[in-house]
Image (cartoon, grey):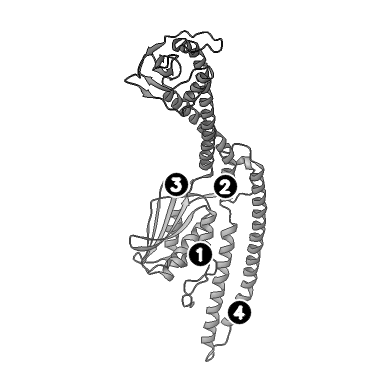
Amino acid sequence: MATPTLFRRLVVAQTIGAFALLLVFSSVFYVERNRVVARLTAQRWAPALRAAAGLPAGTASAPGAFSLRVSERRPDDAIPANTWAPRIVQLRATLLTEGIPVEEIVFTRGVPRPLTWIAVPAADGHERWYGMQDEVVESYVARRLLIALALGIAAVAVASWVAARRLSRPLEALRRRIESHDATAAAGDSPGHAGTPTVEIDAIETAWVALADRLARQESERALLLAGISHDLRSPLARIRMAAELLPETEGVDGRRASIVRNVDVADRLIASFLDYVRAAELPLAATVDVVAIARHLLQARDEAADVLALAAPARLDVPRAHELLLERLLANLVDNAMRHGKPPVLIRIASDERHAIVDVADHGPGMPPGARERLTQAFARGDASRGTPGTGLGLAIVQQIVRRMGGTLAFEVVDGLTCVRVRLPRR
């Protein structure tokens, strides 16, 4: 189940709150209106009822212009009135105030509206029923009430949608800027930005900009440190290698020379990995790169047999906001990882959908345990705890950093029975 957005929650909360308020005010208005109508109706009926029942005259009010029906018994098709209805309660109370005791109130069908029958004890002691046709029973009240509530809910929903949209758009714009790691753009520069940010959103943005600045400085200092160390280490390593190559050809020296050269090569590869890690965070993403051409160039450079390393791809697939060296390093690291820790043959598959370029590097190896996947994308993490397999522990970390910078995703899946590392890069 998808997590509801802030915009949806705001719309629902405002709609429910406004509907509850509208329902309360409508109920109060409806009750008060019923009481007023019942009071006025009873005052109109009172003179004619007193005269017909032979009761003493009450307040000096003129008889209303309506026909009064008289019956000695309760109507056969009578429908009892709801004694708790506000209009009936007020009708009883007002007639009693006018000196007319009411025993029972019922309704019968009539045209254009139902008849209201009131049982009143006459002066001779007999109970008689008096029927009148007036505003006690409203026609189509339920329909009118439903239409009014539907229109009210529609108006509230539209107003809530507009208000929630204006409140959530600054947050949405800030979220897009955070996702794109763009701490320098002005808040109003985001596409689709509308509405005025609140004090809280401004505070969040200020705090995020400060945090992004600190992280950028730390990343820059770390990159400078790694680059400096890597550059400075390569000079003494070159001298060590040269010295090893100049050792005399004597018994026992050849093995030591090979060991020295081998360790120098390992250190050189580690330094190269450091530099790749630095470049993954520093190279600009300002070009549109054909990832298929990168893959073909990689296969030519490796010169592997077709049954060991193969490519399945369209003629061309462009990826915007990329860098050629970064995509080359991404593919090279994935292939190296599959060759070293998986099992040939290795297949590079490149495809696309409407929004993403999809790069799969699949092999026939056993894969990695699900619990280790998150750990192995961190710097210097090794899948082989015994260090029996050569490597620096930076391959997948560099891939993860490149993918994150380009706004993509990295996943480990099983596709068609093959262990697969899948990279999805946005095409827009």
Between 343 and 142, the residue placed more toward the observer is: 142
**Could you give the CA–CA distance between mark 3 and mark 4, rounded to whole angstroms?**
51 Å
Q: What residue is pinned by disc 3?
A: 355
* Image position, residue 219 (x, y; %): 63, 60
Q: Report the amino acid beneath label 4.
A: Ile
Q: Secondary structure at mark 4?
A: helix
Give yes or no for contact between labels 1 and 3 (Cβ–Cβ under 8 Å): no
As drawn, the label of residue 377 is 1
Q: Secondary structure at mark 1?
A: loop
Does label 1 or label 3 sit earlier along the sequence?
Answer: 3
Neighbour tally class for label 2: few under 14, some 14-19, many 20 plus, Cα within 10 Å: few
Does label 3 or label 2 sit earlier along the sequence?
Answer: 2
Does label 3 or label 4 sit earlier along the sequence?
Answer: 4
As drawn, the label of residue 240 is 4
* 242 relative to 359, above or below: below
Q: Please name the residue shown 67% across and 47% down the image.
A: 203
Q: Secondary structure at mark 2?
A: helix
26 left or right of 215 in image: left
Between 152 and 420, the residue placed more toward the observer is: 152
Q: Please name the residue shown 33% across and 63% down the image.
A: 417
